[in-house]
Image: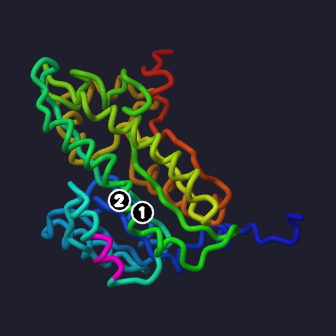
């Protein structure tokens, strides 16, 4: 059976005909994903709130090629913002191969004085936007697909959604100022994981595969405070002795978008160098 199939890397991982949207694509993990697609020939649309940063990232990625990058200014804080981005994407393309739902935020505050807005904003960005972006772009994601070449939705959660003791979720873990905790962040990422599974179940018959990535510690605007202030402490909780790199994240995103993963949906993939499993670098 295998002899009748082309199992070469160039066949399994060919992205030159892809059209990709990455929300939160101007910085951090979103920028890493966008670069991976552009450098492999895809047409990429990135979206976030700040046009100056979007333009800077778009220019950088277009200088790399061979794919292309363009941007849309969008704020996904509510359904209206999601609908705006959906409509802008529909003006630019009649099909979409991959949707990377990466937009997200965190909020740190004292446990006994955690504001209601710290729940509302985080749940809206980290959960609700994923739902409305996926629903709104489903017609584009269904164009030209079949069981062998499905489209993809990749939702970016966090190890904070699977482990309460993770450095991205715990109070005083390094990613919040002392005495503060991102108490709404972990629950929002757990909700992202559950929503991803529900969407995977619903959309598989429509040839849209939905998977979820749970990154551990990577360089980003969200984590740079902790990396700069508590770098040594954070690294002690990394069994590999290092944090994630762009190649780690982009590689996984490309795999989940490739012909090689066409039969995968509903998966939750942790990418953290083992920190969730062991938590500490061995001294042996």
If the image is split into quadrants, where does the N terminus sit? bottom right
Is 86 magenta? The answer is yes
Q: Is residue 33 left or right of residue 168?
A: right
Residue segment shown in magenta: 85-90
Q: Is residue 115 left or right of residue 119?
A: left
Secondary structure of residue under mark 2: helix
User: Among all residues in the image, which is located at the extreme top?
Assistant: 284
Secondary structure of residue under mark 1: helix
Q: Quickly name the residue at label 2.
A: 132
Q: Quickly name the residue at label 1.
A: 135
Residue 86, picture quadrant: bottom left
Q: Is residue 228 left or right of residue 194?
A: left
Identify the residue at image location x=53%, y=63%: 152
Residue 184 in picture, x, y percent from top left: 25, 32
Residue 159, picture quadrant: top left
Identify the residue at image location x=18%, y=29%: 176
Structural crowding at the residue carrying mark 1, measured as other residues with C-alpha within 10 Å and reported as few (<14), some (14–19) or many (≥20): some
Identify the residue at image location x=47%, y=56%: 154
Q: Tell me the distance, in whole angstroms, between the alpha carbons under discs 2 and 1.
A: 5 Å
Q: 203 or 218, which lies in front? A: 203
Residue 181's label in the rendered image is none
Magenta: main secondary structure: helix
Residue 217 in picture, x, y percent from top left: 35, 38
Structural crowding at the residue carrying mark 2, measured as other residues with C-alpha within 10 Å and reported as few (<14), some (14–19) or many (≥20): some
Residue 24 in picture, x, y percent from top left: 28, 59
Tell me whether circle 2 and circle 1 mark residues in contact (CB < 8 Å).
yes
Residue 228 in picture, x, y percent from top left: 18, 36
Q: As displayed, is residue 9 above or below residue 215?
A: below
Identify the residue at image location x=57%, y=47%: 266
């Amino acid at each position: 059976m295998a002899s009748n199939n082309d199992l070469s890397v160039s066949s399994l991982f060919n992205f030159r005909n892809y059209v990709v949207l990455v929300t939160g694509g101007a910085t951090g993990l979103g920028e890493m994903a966008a670069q991976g697609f552009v450098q492999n020939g895809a047409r990429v649309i990135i979206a976030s709130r700040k046009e100056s940063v979007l333009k800077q990232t778009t220019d950088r990625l277009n200088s790399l090629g061979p794919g292309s990058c363009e941007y849309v200014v969008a704020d996904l804080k509510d359904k209206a913002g999601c609908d705006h981005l959906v409509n802008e994407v529909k003006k630019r393309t009649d099909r979409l191969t991959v949707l990377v739902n990466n937009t997200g935020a965190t909020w740190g505050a004292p446990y006994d004085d955690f504001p209601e807005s710290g729940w509302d904003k985080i749940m809206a960005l980290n959960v609700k936007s994923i739902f409305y972006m996926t629903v709104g772009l489903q017609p584009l994601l269904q164009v030209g697909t079949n069981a062998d070449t499905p489209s993809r939705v990749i939702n970016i959660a966090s190890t904070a959604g699977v482990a309460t003791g993770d450095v991205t979720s715990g109070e005083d873990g390094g990613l919040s100022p002392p005495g503060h905790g991102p108490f709404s962040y972990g629950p929002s990422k757990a909700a992202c994981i559950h929503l991803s599974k529900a969407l995977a179940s619903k959309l598989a018959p429509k040839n849209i595969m939905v998977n979820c990535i749970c990154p551990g510690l990577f360089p980003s605007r969200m984590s740079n405070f902790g990396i700069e202030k508590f770098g040594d402490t954070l690294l002690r909780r990394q069994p590999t002795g290092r944090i994630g790199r762009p190649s780690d994240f982009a590689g996984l995103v490309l795999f989940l978008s490739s012909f090689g993963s066409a039969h995968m949906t509903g998966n939750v993939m942790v990418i953290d160098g083992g920190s969730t499993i062991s938590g500490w670098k061995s001294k042996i």
